[in-house]
Amino acid sequence: PYTTLFRSLDAGEVYVEAGGPWAVWTNGRLQAAAHRLRARPDADVVSMALLAPAPDGLKAPDLGGATAARWRSTSPTYAVTALQKYAAEPAPAADLDACRTLEARALQVRARLNGDMGSALVGRPVRPCDFASFDELVEESCDAARNQTLGRADLAGDATGPALVAAEHSDCLPAHGARAFDARGARVASLEGLLDLARAGGGVVGFPAEDVADARATWDQNAAADVWLVPSTVHFVWPTVRTGHVTRTSLEDAESGADRGHASSITTLSMRPQVFRISKFLLEHETDGLIARNKPRIKPSEVGLVGRAGDRTRTSTNAWDTASPVARDVIGRAFRLLKIDAHRKLEDGLQVLHYSRAQWYKPHVDYFTQRNAGGGNVEDDAFSNAIPAANNGTNRFATVFLYLNDAAEGGETVFPLSTTHASYRGGRLVHAGTNRTPGFIRDADAAWVCNGSSEALRVVPRTGDSVLFYSQRGDGSLDGYSLHGSCPMVDGEKWAANLWVWNRPRDAIDRAKAAARKQLAVKFMNARAHAVDLFWDDGGDLSLQGPIPPGQAVDVNTFPGHKFVVKVDGPKGTQVGAWTMKQGMNTQIRIT
Protein backbone atom coordinates (compact mmCIF):
# COMPACT_ATOMS: atom_id res chain seq x y z
CA PRO A 1 0.00 0.00 0.00
CA TYR A 2 2.95 2.37 0.33
CA THR A 3 5.50 3.74 -2.11
CA THR A 4 8.53 5.73 -1.04
CA LEU A 5 10.65 7.75 -3.46
CA PHE A 6 14.32 8.58 -2.99
CA ARG A 7 16.55 10.92 -4.96
CA SER A 8 20.22 10.03 -5.27
CA LEU A 9 22.89 12.68 -5.58
CA ASP A 10 25.29 10.32 -7.27
CA ALA A 11 25.57 6.70 -8.32
CA GLY A 12 26.38 4.52 -5.34
CA GLU A 13 25.08 2.10 -2.80
CA VAL A 14 22.42 2.61 -0.15
CA TYR A 15 21.43 0.46 2.80
CA VAL A 16 17.72 0.55 3.51
CA GLU A 17 15.86 -0.57 6.64
CA ALA A 18 12.11 -0.95 7.06
CA GLY A 19 12.40 -1.19 10.85
CA GLY A 20 10.82 -4.63 11.13
CA PRO A 21 10.65 -8.16 9.64
CA TRP A 22 8.49 -7.30 6.65
CA ALA A 23 9.24 -8.32 3.08
CA VAL A 24 9.14 -5.38 0.68
CA TRP A 25 9.37 -4.90 -3.06
CA THR A 26 12.22 -2.63 -4.05
CA ASN A 27 12.27 -1.58 -7.71
CA GLY A 28 10.31 -4.65 -8.64
CA ARG A 29 12.28 -7.25 -6.68
CA LEU A 30 11.34 -8.96 -3.45
CA GLN A 31 13.78 -7.97 -0.71
CA ALA A 32 14.21 -8.38 3.01
CA ALA A 33 13.16 -5.48 5.21
CA ALA A 34 16.82 -4.48 5.49
CA HIS A 35 18.87 -4.76 2.32
CA ARG A 36 21.47 -3.11 0.14
CA LEU A 37 20.52 -1.29 -3.02
CA ARG A 38 22.75 -0.17 -5.85
CA ALA A 39 21.75 2.99 -7.68
CA ARG A 40 21.48 3.34 -11.44
CA PRO A 41 23.56 6.15 -12.94
CA ASP A 42 20.67 7.17 -15.21
CA ALA A 43 17.85 7.23 -12.62
CA ASP A 44 17.23 8.92 -9.30
CA VAL A 45 14.01 7.26 -8.14
CA VAL A 46 13.67 4.23 -5.93
CA SER A 47 10.22 2.74 -5.30
CA MET A 48 9.31 0.68 -2.23
CA ALA A 49 6.10 -1.25 -1.61
CA LEU A 50 5.10 -3.03 1.61
CA LEU A 51 3.40 -6.24 0.52
CA ALA A 52 1.72 -7.62 3.62
CA PRO A 53 0.15 -6.37 6.85
CA ALA A 54 2.25 -6.44 10.01
CA PRO A 55 2.37 -9.72 11.95
CA ASP A 56 0.30 -9.88 15.14
CA GLY A 57 1.79 -7.80 17.92
CA LEU A 58 3.95 -5.68 15.60
CA LYS A 59 3.19 -2.28 14.16
CA ALA A 60 3.77 -1.85 10.45
CA PRO A 61 6.22 0.95 9.67
CA ASP A 62 4.92 4.14 8.18
CA LEU A 63 7.06 4.47 5.07
CA GLY A 64 6.26 8.12 4.48
CA GLY A 65 6.30 11.54 6.08
CA ALA A 66 8.24 11.88 9.32
CA THR A 67 10.04 8.58 8.91
CA ALA A 68 12.55 10.09 6.49
CA ALA A 69 15.22 10.04 9.18
CA ARG A 70 14.88 6.26 9.44
CA TRP A 71 16.25 5.85 5.91
CA ARG A 72 19.99 6.21 5.87
CA SER A 73 22.72 5.78 3.29
CA THR A 74 26.14 4.19 3.62
CA SER A 75 27.46 6.72 1.13
CA PRO A 76 27.67 10.44 1.91
CA THR A 77 26.96 11.14 -1.78
CA TYR A 78 23.64 9.29 -1.70
CA ALA A 79 20.95 11.00 0.32
CA VAL A 80 17.19 10.90 0.81
CA THR A 81 15.75 14.19 -0.37
CA ALA A 82 12.06 13.42 -0.75
CA LEU A 83 9.49 10.97 0.54
CA GLN A 84 5.98 10.57 -0.74
CA LYS A 85 3.19 8.28 0.38
CA TYR A 86 0.35 7.85 -2.09
CA ALA A 87 -3.10 8.23 -0.55
CA ALA A 88 -4.57 7.07 -3.86
CA GLU A 89 -2.61 5.05 -6.38
CA PRO A 90 -1.67 7.09 -9.47
CA ALA A 91 -3.00 5.72 -12.77
CA PRO A 92 -0.47 3.69 -14.75
CA ALA A 93 0.30 4.43 -18.40
CA ALA A 94 -0.86 0.96 -19.40
CA ASP A 95 -4.63 0.52 -19.23
CA LEU A 96 -4.33 -2.99 -17.81
CA ASP A 97 -5.76 -4.60 -14.72
CA ALA A 98 -2.30 -6.16 -14.30
CA CYS A 99 -0.83 -2.67 -13.78
CA ARG A 100 -3.27 -1.49 -11.09
CA THR A 101 -1.03 -2.35 -8.15
CA LEU A 102 2.07 -0.52 -6.96
CA GLU A 103 3.93 -3.81 -6.97
CA ALA A 104 3.24 -4.29 -10.70
CA ARG A 105 4.16 -0.70 -11.55
CA ALA A 106 7.49 -1.08 -9.78
CA LEU A 107 8.48 -4.19 -11.76
CA GLN A 108 11.38 -3.68 -14.15
CA VAL A 109 13.09 -5.63 -16.90
CA ARG A 110 16.27 -4.73 -18.70
CA ALA A 111 15.73 -4.08 -22.41
CA ARG A 112 18.65 -5.17 -24.57
CA LEU A 113 19.53 -5.37 -28.25
CA ASN A 114 19.73 -8.67 -30.10
CA GLY A 115 23.36 -9.68 -30.60
CA ASP A 116 24.77 -7.75 -27.62
CA MET A 117 26.27 -11.03 -26.28
CA GLY A 118 24.67 -10.43 -22.89
CA SER A 119 27.28 -7.79 -22.08
CA ALA A 120 27.07 -6.09 -18.68
CA LEU A 121 27.91 -2.80 -20.36
CA VAL A 122 24.61 -2.34 -22.16
CA GLY A 123 20.93 -2.65 -21.37
CA ARG A 124 18.30 -0.21 -20.14
CA PRO A 125 15.97 -0.97 -17.20
CA VAL A 126 12.34 -0.23 -18.08
CA ARG A 127 9.02 -0.60 -16.29
CA PRO A 128 6.44 -2.34 -18.51
CA CYS A 129 3.57 -0.46 -16.88
CA ASP A 130 5.10 2.86 -17.96
CA PHE A 131 4.09 2.11 -21.56
CA ALA A 132 0.65 2.39 -23.08
CA SER A 133 1.12 -0.81 -25.10
CA PHE A 134 3.53 -3.65 -25.70
CA ASP A 135 4.27 -2.37 -29.22
CA GLU A 136 5.21 1.02 -27.77
CA LEU A 137 7.60 -0.64 -25.30
CA VAL A 138 9.25 -2.71 -28.05
CA GLU A 139 9.69 0.23 -30.40
CA GLU A 140 10.99 2.74 -27.84
CA SER A 141 13.17 0.28 -25.93
CA CYS A 142 14.60 -1.24 -29.11
CA ASP A 143 15.52 2.21 -30.46
CA ALA A 144 17.14 3.13 -27.13
CA ALA A 145 19.06 -0.17 -27.04
CA ARG A 146 20.31 0.39 -30.57
CA ASN A 147 21.55 3.86 -29.68
CA GLN A 148 23.37 2.43 -26.67
CA THR A 149 24.79 -0.72 -28.30
CA LEU A 150 25.59 -0.16 -31.99
CA GLY A 151 29.18 0.81 -32.66
CA ARG A 152 30.58 -0.66 -29.43
CA ALA A 153 33.63 -2.88 -29.85
CA ASP A 154 33.78 -4.08 -26.23
CA LEU A 155 30.71 -6.34 -26.02
CA ALA A 156 32.77 -9.55 -25.81
CA GLY A 157 34.71 -8.22 -22.83
CA ASP A 158 37.59 -6.70 -24.79
CA ALA A 159 37.98 -3.86 -27.27
CA THR A 160 38.68 -5.84 -30.43
CA GLY A 161 35.18 -5.78 -31.95
CA PRO A 162 33.87 -5.93 -34.56
CA ALA A 163 31.06 -3.60 -33.54
CA LEU A 164 27.41 -4.25 -34.33
CA VAL A 165 25.87 -2.15 -37.08
CA ALA A 166 22.32 -1.31 -38.13
CA ALA A 167 21.20 -3.66 -40.90
CA GLU A 168 19.83 -1.85 -43.91
CA HIS A 169 16.00 -1.70 -43.95
CA SER A 170 15.91 -2.96 -40.35
CA ASP A 171 13.84 -1.06 -37.78
CA CYS A 172 12.18 -1.43 -34.38
CA LEU A 173 8.55 -1.40 -35.50
CA PRO A 174 6.58 -4.48 -34.35
CA ALA A 175 4.39 -4.06 -37.45
CA HIS A 176 7.52 -4.75 -39.53
CA GLY A 177 8.58 -7.75 -37.45
CA ALA A 178 10.42 -6.38 -34.38
CA ARG A 179 9.88 -8.75 -31.43
CA ALA A 180 11.11 -9.70 -27.96
CA PHE A 181 12.64 -12.82 -26.34
CA ASP A 182 13.65 -13.67 -22.80
CA ALA A 183 16.93 -15.22 -21.64
CA ARG A 184 15.60 -18.76 -22.26
CA GLY A 185 14.66 -17.94 -25.81
CA ALA A 186 10.92 -17.77 -25.13
CA ARG A 187 8.96 -15.25 -27.19
CA VAL A 188 7.43 -12.45 -25.10
CA ALA A 189 4.41 -10.84 -26.74
CA SER A 190 2.58 -8.74 -24.14
CA LEU A 191 3.04 -6.41 -21.19
CA GLU A 192 1.49 -9.11 -19.00
CA GLY A 193 4.17 -11.49 -20.24
CA LEU A 194 6.89 -9.02 -19.24
CA LEU A 195 5.36 -8.63 -15.77
CA ASP A 196 5.29 -12.42 -15.36
CA LEU A 197 8.92 -12.54 -16.49
CA ALA A 198 9.90 -9.92 -13.91
CA ARG A 199 8.01 -11.71 -11.13
CA ALA A 200 9.79 -14.96 -11.98
CA GLY A 201 12.95 -13.16 -10.87
CA GLY A 202 15.38 -14.88 -13.22
CA GLY A 203 17.85 -12.05 -12.72
CA VAL A 204 19.95 -10.25 -15.28
CA VAL A 205 23.13 -11.45 -16.94
CA GLY A 206 26.33 -9.73 -17.91
CA PHE A 207 29.89 -10.29 -19.14
CA PRO A 208 32.47 -10.17 -17.73
CA ALA A 209 31.74 -10.98 -14.10
CA GLU A 210 34.23 -8.44 -12.77
CA ASP A 211 32.24 -5.66 -14.43
CA VAL A 212 29.62 -5.92 -11.69
CA ALA A 213 31.60 -3.24 -9.86
CA ASP A 214 32.45 -1.36 -13.06
CA ALA A 215 30.92 2.10 -13.18
CA ARG A 216 30.07 1.46 -16.85
CA ALA A 217 28.00 -1.63 -16.05
CA THR A 218 24.23 -1.28 -16.36
CA TRP A 219 23.20 -4.38 -14.47
CA ASP A 220 22.10 -4.03 -10.86
CA GLN A 221 19.22 -4.99 -8.62
CA ASN A 222 16.83 -2.59 -10.33
CA ALA A 223 15.87 -5.03 -13.10
CA ALA A 224 14.42 -8.44 -12.39
CA ALA A 225 15.07 -10.08 -15.78
CA ASP A 226 16.50 -9.48 -19.25
CA VAL A 227 14.56 -9.15 -22.48
CA TRP A 228 16.20 -8.99 -25.91
CA LEU A 229 14.64 -6.79 -28.60
CA VAL A 230 15.09 -8.19 -32.11
CA PRO A 231 14.68 -5.60 -34.90
CA SER A 232 12.88 -6.45 -38.12
CA THR A 233 14.73 -8.37 -40.90
CA VAL A 234 17.10 -10.17 -38.48
CA HIS A 235 16.81 -13.34 -36.38
CA PHE A 236 17.20 -13.94 -32.65
CA VAL A 237 20.76 -14.89 -31.64
CA TRP A 238 21.40 -16.67 -28.36
CA PRO A 239 23.36 -14.38 -26.00
CA THR A 240 26.74 -15.86 -25.11
CA VAL A 241 26.96 -13.90 -21.79
CA ARG A 242 30.28 -15.45 -20.78
CA THR A 243 32.26 -18.61 -21.51
CA GLY A 244 30.72 -21.42 -19.48
CA HIS A 245 27.34 -19.71 -19.14
CA VAL A 246 24.49 -22.26 -19.16
CA THR A 247 20.90 -21.67 -20.28
CA ARG A 248 18.10 -24.22 -20.20
CA THR A 249 15.58 -24.05 -23.04
CA SER A 250 12.52 -26.04 -24.07
CA LEU A 251 12.51 -27.70 -27.50
CA GLU A 252 8.82 -28.55 -27.39
CA ASP A 253 6.49 -27.55 -30.20
CA ALA A 254 3.60 -25.90 -28.40
CA GLU A 255 1.23 -26.34 -31.35
CA SER A 256 1.85 -29.95 -32.35
CA GLY A 257 3.09 -31.28 -29.01
CA ALA A 258 6.26 -32.65 -30.63
CA ASP A 259 9.19 -33.06 -28.24
CA ARG A 260 6.94 -32.70 -25.22
CA GLY A 261 9.14 -32.41 -22.15
CA HIS A 262 12.35 -32.28 -24.23
CA ALA A 263 14.72 -29.56 -23.03
CA SER A 264 18.44 -28.97 -23.53
CA SER A 265 21.19 -27.08 -21.77
CA ILE A 266 22.95 -24.48 -23.93
CA THR A 267 26.53 -23.94 -22.76
CA THR A 268 28.63 -21.09 -24.15
CA LEU A 269 31.96 -22.39 -25.45
CA SER A 270 33.19 -19.17 -27.05
CA MET A 271 32.17 -15.51 -27.13
CA ARG A 272 33.67 -14.86 -30.57
CA PRO A 273 32.77 -16.75 -32.63
CA GLN A 274 29.50 -17.44 -30.85
CA VAL A 275 29.67 -21.19 -30.21
CA PHE A 276 27.42 -23.29 -27.96
CA ARG A 277 27.24 -26.96 -26.98
CA ILE A 278 23.65 -28.24 -26.86
CA SER A 279 23.34 -31.20 -24.51
CA LYS A 280 21.13 -34.20 -25.30
CA PHE A 281 19.75 -32.64 -28.44
CA LEU A 282 19.22 -35.99 -30.18
CA LEU A 283 17.42 -39.07 -28.88
CA GLU A 284 19.09 -42.48 -29.01
CA HIS A 285 16.79 -43.88 -31.69
CA GLU A 286 17.53 -40.80 -33.84
CA THR A 287 21.32 -41.20 -33.77
CA ASP A 288 21.05 -44.91 -34.55
CA GLY A 289 18.38 -44.35 -37.19
CA LEU A 290 20.27 -41.66 -39.08
CA ILE A 291 23.39 -43.85 -39.26
CA ALA A 292 21.48 -46.98 -40.32
CA ARG A 293 19.46 -45.20 -43.00
CA ASN A 294 22.34 -43.28 -44.57
CA LYS A 295 25.26 -45.70 -44.24
CA PRO A 296 24.42 -47.43 -47.58
CA ARG A 297 23.90 -44.08 -49.31
CA ILE A 298 27.10 -42.17 -48.57
CA LYS A 299 29.36 -40.88 -51.32
CA PRO A 300 32.38 -38.54 -51.48
CA SER A 301 31.58 -35.14 -50.00
CA GLU A 302 31.44 -32.03 -52.17
CA VAL A 303 32.44 -28.42 -51.63
CA GLY A 304 31.26 -25.12 -53.08
CA LEU A 305 27.88 -23.87 -54.12
CA VAL A 306 27.55 -26.21 -57.09
CA GLY A 307 29.05 -29.28 -55.41
CA ARG A 308 32.62 -30.14 -56.40
CA ALA A 309 33.80 -33.60 -55.30
CA GLY A 310 37.39 -34.80 -54.92
CA ASP A 311 38.66 -31.65 -53.19
CA ARG A 312 41.62 -32.40 -50.90
CA THR A 313 40.31 -29.94 -48.30
CA ARG A 314 37.33 -32.25 -47.62
CA THR A 315 37.89 -36.01 -47.65
CA SER A 316 34.80 -37.23 -45.80
CA THR A 317 31.76 -38.98 -47.26
CA ASN A 318 28.16 -37.86 -46.90
CA ALA A 319 24.51 -38.43 -47.76
CA TRP A 320 21.53 -36.07 -47.82
CA ASP A 321 18.46 -36.92 -45.76
CA THR A 322 15.68 -34.44 -46.44
CA ALA A 323 12.46 -36.42 -46.09
CA SER A 324 12.78 -39.32 -43.65
CA PRO A 325 10.63 -39.03 -40.51
CA VAL A 326 13.69 -38.90 -38.25
CA ALA A 327 15.32 -36.21 -40.37
CA ARG A 328 12.17 -34.09 -40.35
CA ASP A 329 11.86 -34.44 -36.56
CA VAL A 330 15.47 -33.34 -36.07
CA ILE A 331 15.16 -30.44 -38.53
CA GLY A 332 12.03 -29.19 -36.79
CA ARG A 333 13.78 -29.34 -33.42
CA ALA A 334 16.74 -27.36 -34.81
CA PHE A 335 14.41 -24.58 -35.94
CA ARG A 336 12.85 -24.52 -32.47
CA LEU A 337 16.33 -24.26 -30.94
CA LEU A 338 16.99 -21.24 -33.17
CA LYS A 339 13.54 -19.78 -32.40
CA ILE A 340 12.74 -19.55 -36.11
CA ASP A 341 9.55 -20.80 -37.75
CA ALA A 342 10.45 -23.88 -39.81
CA HIS A 343 10.34 -23.45 -43.58
CA ARG A 344 11.75 -25.71 -46.30
CA LYS A 345 13.27 -22.77 -48.15
CA LEU A 346 15.26 -21.80 -45.05
CA GLU A 347 17.15 -25.11 -44.90
CA ASP A 348 19.54 -27.20 -46.98
CA GLY A 349 18.25 -30.49 -45.60
CA LEU A 350 20.07 -32.75 -43.17
CA GLN A 351 23.57 -33.72 -44.31
CA VAL A 352 24.80 -36.97 -42.73
CA LEU A 353 28.61 -37.19 -42.57
CA HIS A 354 31.08 -40.03 -42.12
CA TYR A 355 34.79 -39.69 -41.36
CA SER A 356 37.21 -42.63 -41.38
CA ARG A 357 40.84 -42.63 -40.25
CA ALA A 358 42.78 -39.55 -41.49
CA GLN A 359 39.71 -38.00 -43.13
CA TRP A 360 39.07 -34.34 -42.34
CA TYR A 361 37.47 -31.08 -43.47
CA LYS A 362 39.85 -28.14 -43.61
CA PRO A 363 38.60 -25.07 -41.69
CA HIS A 364 36.17 -22.97 -43.73
CA VAL A 365 33.12 -20.74 -43.29
CA ASP A 366 29.62 -22.02 -44.02
CA TYR A 367 28.33 -18.84 -45.62
CA PHE A 368 28.92 -18.20 -49.32
CA THR A 369 31.12 -15.56 -50.91
CA GLN A 370 32.56 -15.25 -54.39
CA ARG A 371 35.78 -16.66 -52.98
CA ASN A 372 34.39 -19.96 -51.71
CA ALA A 373 31.53 -20.69 -54.16
CA GLY A 374 33.50 -22.81 -56.55
CA GLY A 375 32.80 -23.52 -60.20
CA GLY A 376 29.96 -22.81 -62.56
CA ASN A 377 30.60 -19.10 -63.10
CA VAL A 378 27.54 -18.40 -60.99
CA GLU A 379 28.96 -15.59 -58.87
CA ASP A 380 27.08 -12.71 -60.49
CA ASP A 381 23.71 -14.44 -60.17
CA ALA A 382 24.21 -16.03 -56.74
CA PHE A 383 26.07 -13.30 -54.92
CA SER A 384 24.59 -10.08 -56.19
CA ASN A 385 22.59 -9.95 -52.94
CA ALA A 386 24.37 -12.22 -50.45
CA ILE A 387 25.21 -9.69 -47.72
CA PRO A 388 22.40 -10.04 -45.14
CA ALA A 389 23.01 -6.66 -43.51
CA ALA A 390 22.66 -4.90 -46.88
CA ASN A 391 19.49 -4.78 -48.98
CA ASN A 392 17.93 -7.82 -47.24
CA GLY A 393 20.59 -10.16 -48.60
CA THR A 394 20.37 -13.96 -48.35
CA ASN A 395 22.97 -16.33 -46.90
CA ARG A 396 23.43 -19.07 -44.34
CA PHE A 397 22.56 -17.85 -40.86
CA ALA A 398 23.45 -20.67 -38.45
CA THR A 399 24.76 -24.22 -38.34
CA VAL A 400 23.45 -26.93 -36.03
CA PHE A 401 26.09 -29.68 -36.04
CA LEU A 402 24.99 -33.04 -34.62
CA TYR A 403 27.14 -35.82 -33.17
CA LEU A 404 25.83 -39.32 -33.90
CA ASN A 405 28.58 -41.26 -32.11
CA ASP A 406 31.53 -40.85 -29.76
CA ALA A 407 34.56 -40.62 -32.03
CA ALA A 408 37.36 -42.80 -30.62
CA GLU A 409 40.17 -40.29 -31.20
CA GLY A 410 40.29 -37.17 -33.32
CA GLY A 411 37.38 -35.74 -35.27
CA GLU A 412 36.96 -32.68 -33.05
CA THR A 413 35.15 -29.64 -34.43
CA VAL A 414 37.79 -26.91 -34.36
CA PHE A 415 37.37 -23.11 -34.34
CA PRO A 416 40.82 -21.66 -35.18
CA LEU A 417 39.93 -17.99 -34.57
CA SER A 418 38.42 -18.33 -31.11
CA THR A 419 40.43 -16.64 -28.35
CA THR A 420 37.56 -16.39 -25.86
CA HIS A 421 37.19 -20.05 -24.83
CA ALA A 422 38.11 -21.41 -21.40
CA SER A 423 41.30 -23.25 -22.41
CA TYR A 424 42.90 -20.33 -24.28
CA ARG A 425 45.93 -18.85 -22.52
CA GLY A 426 47.31 -16.52 -25.18
CA GLY A 427 49.20 -19.02 -27.32
CA ARG A 428 49.62 -18.69 -31.09
CA LEU A 429 46.85 -20.26 -33.16
CA VAL A 430 47.04 -18.87 -36.71
CA HIS A 431 49.10 -16.34 -38.63
CA ALA A 432 48.21 -12.70 -38.03
CA GLY A 433 45.58 -11.40 -40.43
CA THR A 434 43.85 -14.73 -41.01
CA ASN A 435 40.59 -13.26 -39.72
CA ARG A 436 40.74 -10.63 -42.47
CA THR A 437 40.33 -13.26 -45.22
CA PRO A 438 37.08 -15.08 -44.35
CA GLY A 439 37.23 -18.78 -45.08
CA PHE A 440 40.99 -18.91 -45.67
CA ILE A 441 43.58 -20.56 -43.44
CA ARG A 442 47.10 -21.78 -44.19
CA ASP A 443 47.58 -25.53 -44.31
CA ALA A 444 50.20 -25.34 -41.55
CA ASP A 445 47.77 -23.44 -39.31
CA ALA A 446 44.97 -25.90 -40.07
CA ALA A 447 47.23 -28.73 -38.93
CA TRP A 448 48.43 -26.87 -35.82
CA VAL A 449 45.00 -26.01 -34.42
CA CYS A 450 44.15 -29.75 -34.52
CA ASN A 451 47.33 -30.59 -32.62
CA GLY A 452 46.66 -31.44 -28.98
CA SER A 453 49.43 -29.04 -27.95
CA SER A 454 47.66 -26.00 -29.38
CA GLU A 455 45.16 -23.95 -27.36
CA ALA A 456 42.55 -23.90 -30.11
CA LEU A 457 38.89 -24.51 -29.31
CA ARG A 458 38.26 -28.16 -30.20
CA VAL A 459 34.82 -29.61 -29.43
CA VAL A 460 34.97 -33.34 -28.73
CA PRO A 461 32.11 -35.36 -30.30
CA ARG A 462 29.61 -36.70 -27.77
CA THR A 463 26.71 -38.86 -28.88
CA GLY A 464 23.42 -36.98 -28.99
CA ASP A 465 24.94 -33.54 -28.37
CA SER A 466 25.16 -30.79 -30.95
CA VAL A 467 27.15 -27.63 -31.52
CA LEU A 468 25.43 -24.42 -32.57
CA PHE A 469 27.36 -21.60 -34.15
CA TYR A 470 26.35 -18.59 -36.19
CA SER A 471 27.50 -17.45 -39.62
CA GLN A 472 25.72 -14.15 -38.97
CA ARG A 473 25.70 -11.95 -35.90
CA GLY A 474 22.65 -10.36 -34.35
CA ASP A 475 22.78 -7.44 -36.78
CA GLY A 476 22.87 -9.66 -39.88
CA SER A 477 26.58 -9.08 -40.60
CA LEU A 478 28.60 -12.11 -41.72
CA ASP A 479 31.00 -13.40 -39.07
CA GLY A 480 34.42 -14.34 -40.40
CA TYR A 481 35.35 -15.61 -36.94
CA SER A 482 33.01 -18.58 -37.57
CA LEU A 483 35.86 -20.34 -39.42
CA HIS A 484 35.66 -24.01 -38.40
CA GLY A 485 36.60 -27.49 -39.55
CA SER A 486 36.73 -31.16 -38.64
CA CYS A 487 40.08 -32.41 -37.34
CA PRO A 488 41.44 -35.62 -38.90
CA MET A 489 40.29 -38.91 -37.41
CA VAL A 490 43.16 -40.60 -35.55
CA ASP A 491 41.36 -43.78 -34.58
CA GLY A 492 37.90 -45.19 -35.18
CA GLU A 493 35.19 -43.43 -37.16
CA LYS A 494 32.99 -40.37 -36.75
CA TRP A 495 29.32 -40.11 -37.67
CA ALA A 496 27.76 -36.66 -37.62
CA ALA A 497 25.14 -34.55 -39.35
CA ASN A 498 24.53 -30.88 -39.88
CA LEU A 499 21.72 -28.52 -40.76
CA TRP A 500 22.35 -25.16 -42.37
CA VAL A 501 19.61 -22.61 -41.74
CA TRP A 502 19.31 -19.52 -43.94
CA ASN A 503 18.22 -16.04 -42.90
CA ARG A 504 15.77 -15.76 -45.82
CA PRO A 505 14.32 -18.08 -48.48
CA ARG A 506 17.17 -19.17 -50.70
CA ASP A 507 15.45 -18.75 -54.08
CA ALA A 508 18.22 -16.69 -55.69
CA ILE A 509 20.88 -19.17 -54.56
CA ASP A 510 18.79 -22.08 -55.89
CA ARG A 511 18.44 -20.39 -59.26
CA ALA A 512 22.18 -19.86 -59.49
CA LYS A 513 22.89 -23.43 -58.43
CA ALA A 514 20.40 -24.77 -60.95
CA ALA A 515 22.02 -22.80 -63.74
CA ALA A 516 25.44 -24.16 -62.79
CA ARG A 517 24.21 -27.75 -62.58
CA LYS A 518 22.14 -27.58 -65.80
CA GLN A 519 18.72 -27.88 -64.28
CA LEU A 520 16.07 -29.85 -66.15
CA ALA A 521 12.55 -28.51 -66.68
CA VAL A 522 10.33 -31.59 -66.92
CA LYS A 523 6.61 -31.77 -67.68
CA PHE A 524 4.64 -34.79 -66.38
CA MET A 525 1.38 -35.21 -68.37
CA ASN A 526 -1.38 -37.49 -67.06
CA ALA A 527 -2.99 -39.34 -69.99
CA ARG A 528 -4.88 -41.73 -67.73
CA ALA A 529 -8.59 -41.58 -66.94
CA HIS A 530 -8.02 -41.06 -63.24
CA ALA A 531 -5.82 -38.84 -61.05
CA VAL A 532 -2.31 -39.96 -60.15
CA ASP A 533 0.23 -38.87 -57.52
CA LEU A 534 3.76 -37.74 -58.45
CA PHE A 535 6.54 -38.49 -55.94
CA TRP A 536 10.23 -37.68 -55.75
CA ASP A 537 12.11 -40.80 -54.65
CA ASP A 538 14.69 -39.53 -52.15
CA GLY A 539 16.64 -42.76 -51.71
CA GLY A 540 13.62 -44.81 -50.67
CA ASP A 541 11.53 -42.04 -49.07
CA LEU A 542 8.74 -40.73 -51.28
CA SER A 543 8.16 -36.98 -51.17
CA LEU A 544 4.82 -35.99 -52.70
CA GLN A 545 5.17 -33.38 -55.46
CA GLY A 546 1.45 -33.17 -56.00
CA PRO A 547 -1.58 -34.91 -57.50
CA ILE A 548 -2.09 -34.71 -61.28
CA PRO A 549 -5.74 -34.75 -62.38
CA PRO A 550 -6.62 -36.63 -65.61
CA GLY A 551 -5.70 -34.70 -68.73
CA GLN A 552 -3.54 -32.21 -66.86
CA ALA A 553 0.21 -31.72 -66.37
CA VAL A 554 2.70 -30.69 -63.66
CA ASP A 555 5.96 -28.84 -64.32
CA VAL A 556 8.96 -29.85 -62.19
CA ASN A 557 12.42 -28.25 -62.04
CA THR A 558 14.91 -30.99 -61.22
CA PHE A 559 18.45 -32.25 -61.81
CA PRO A 560 20.19 -35.21 -63.44
CA GLY A 561 20.11 -38.26 -61.17
CA HIS A 562 16.81 -37.43 -59.48
CA LYS A 563 14.18 -40.17 -59.62
CA PHE A 564 10.42 -39.71 -59.82
CA VAL A 565 7.64 -42.27 -59.49
CA VAL A 566 3.94 -42.07 -60.21
CA LYS A 567 1.38 -44.02 -58.17
CA VAL A 568 -2.35 -44.26 -57.80
CA ASP A 569 -4.00 -44.17 -54.38
CA GLY A 570 -1.11 -42.65 -52.46
CA PRO A 571 2.45 -43.71 -51.58
CA LYS A 572 1.42 -47.31 -50.81
CA GLY A 573 -0.69 -47.62 -53.95
CA THR A 574 0.13 -49.16 -57.32
CA GLN A 575 3.12 -47.76 -59.17
CA VAL A 576 2.42 -46.90 -62.79
CA GLY A 577 5.75 -45.38 -63.79
CA ALA A 578 9.29 -44.44 -62.71
CA TRP A 579 11.84 -42.16 -64.36
CA THR A 580 15.47 -41.20 -63.59
CA MET A 581 16.45 -37.76 -64.88
CA LYS A 582 19.27 -37.56 -67.44
CA GLN A 583 20.78 -34.87 -69.61
CA GLY A 584 19.42 -35.11 -73.15
CA MET A 585 16.28 -37.00 -72.13
CA ASN A 586 12.81 -36.22 -73.45
CA THR A 587 11.50 -33.80 -70.84
CA GLN A 588 7.86 -34.24 -71.93
CA ILE A 589 6.85 -37.34 -69.93
CA ARG A 590 3.49 -38.92 -70.77
CA ILE A 591 1.91 -40.98 -67.95
CA THR A 592 -0.15 -43.84 -69.41
Image (cartoon, grey):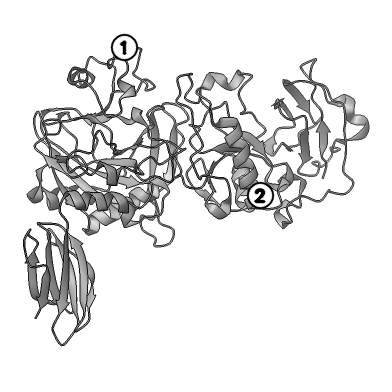
* Residue 571, disc: none
Residue 394 in sight from this viewpoint: yes
**Which image quadrant is residue 568 in?**
bottom left
* Residue 136, disc: 2
**Residue at numbered disc 1:** 427
In three-dimensional space, the C-alpha distance between marks 2 and 1, rounded to whole angstroms, equals 48 Å
Relative placement, left or right, of 163 versus 297 is right
Q: Is residue 499 above or below residue 216?
A: below
Choose between 114 and 439: the one closer to the eye. Answer: 439
Residue 571 in sight from this viewpoint: no
Taking the spot 17% from the left edge, 86% from the top edge, the residue there is: 530
Taking the spot 81% from the left edge, 51% from the top edge, the residue there is: 91
Relative placement, left or right, of 16 versus 497 is right
Relative placement, left or right, of 428 versus 376 is right
Say if mark 2 contacts mark 1, CB within 8 Å: no
Q: Position of residue 107 (x, y in %)?
A: 69, 42
**Which image quadrant is residue 459 in?**
top left
Numbered label tally: 2
Q: Position of residue 196 (x, y in %)?
A: 61, 48
Q: Position of residue 577 (x, y in %)?
A: 8, 73
Q: Specify the amino acid type for callout 2.
A: Glu
Element under disc 1: loop
Q: Is residue 461 above or below residue 509?
A: above
Q: Position of residue 176 (x, y in %)?
A: 54, 53
Q: Considering the image in quadrants, where does the C terminus appear? A: bottom left
Choose between 362 and 303: the one closer to the eye. Answer: 303
Taking the spot 22% from the left edge, 14% from the top edge, the residue there is: 453
Q: Considering the image in quadrants, where does the N terminus appear? A: top right
